[in-house]
Amino acid sequence: MSFRHNVFISYHHKNDENYKIKFERMFSSIYDIIQTKAVSDGDISPYLKTETIRQKIRDEFIRNASVTIVLIGSETWKRKHVDWEISSSIRDTQLNSRTGLIGIILPTYPRTDSTKYSRGTIPPRLQDNIDCEFAEIHNWSDDPHQVQSWIHEAFLRRKQINPDNSRVMFAQNRSNSNWR
């Protein structure tokens, strides 16, 4: 498969930056199967109005992406910016068409069985879209052919299945043990 996609990466900056860097290095630099974009700390002023931040995320960072990948660690689901990025990614707007969506569970995600995950500790908007089959979730992989296949399948699904963006967006970060 020789499909190369523009990918937006959503992740928990403090906890999972190293995996984001590893993902970009492997699949963008070494294997050259994706072109990546992500919001880094300091890219957007936290003093802007919430709606302005959401618009900047969509128009300046997600705009050219065809697929959004959510890297899922132990606390990713708690982050308001991850929720906003997923919501912005799956919206069709006049300037930007929606992206495909996949979740990749990181090795740091707490679980004893690698074939299962707790629905309450996956970003809720991502889980909504797994439920409606717009998105899929996978375990971390270093295999470029497998990852490229996941990305391309998400790219194709983005026009075949309607996403679920009905959940109210996070107003702030969460601190519970799960969202259910």
Image (cartoon, rainbow, N blue to C red):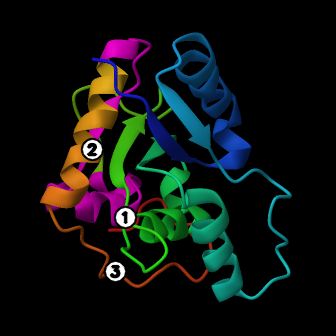
In front of the other: 45 or 37: 37
Graded by Cα atoms within 10 Å as few (under 14), some (14 to 19) or many (20 or more), the crowding at tag 3 reads few
Q: Is residue 57 above or below residue 77?
A: below
Rendered image: mark on residue 154: 2
Tell me the amino acid under the disc marked 3: Arg
Question: Residue at 38% of width from left, 57% of height from top?
Answer: 99
How far separated are the C-alphas under marks 3 and 2? 21 Å
Marks 3,1: beta carbons within 8 A: no
Q: The residue tagged with tag 1: helix, strand or loop?
A: loop
Residue, disc 1: 98
Marks 2,1: beta carbons within 8 A: no
Graded by Cα atoms within 10 Å as few (under 14), some (14 to 19) or many (20 or more), the crowding at tag 1 reads many
Tell me the amino acid under the disc marked 2: Ala
Question: Residue at 37% of width from left, 64% of height from top?
Answer: 98
Quadrant for the C terminus in the image: bottom left
Q: Position of residue 156 (x, y in %)?
A: 21, 46
Q: In this view, does 135 lie above or below 171?
A: above
Task: Tell which circle, 3 or 2, labels the residue nearer the N-terminal end.
Answer: 2
Rendered image: mark on residue 167: 3
Marks 3,2: beta carbons within 8 A: no
Quadrant for the N terminus in the image: top left
Q: Is residue 125 magenta?
A: yes
Left or right, 26 with respect to 15, comes to left
Q: Position of residue 165 (x, y in %)?
A: 31, 76
Labels 3, 1: front one: 1
Q: Can residue 113 be seen in this view?
A: no
Task: Tell which circle, 3 or 1, labels the residue nearer the N-terminal end.
Answer: 1
Kindly indicate the quadrant of the structure image that contains residue 20. Answer: top right
How far separated are the C-alphas under marks 3 and 1? 17 Å
Q: Is residue 15 visible?
A: yes
Give, as a single range, the part of the protein colored magenta: 119-145
Question: Residue at 64% of width from left, 48% of height from top?
Answer: 38
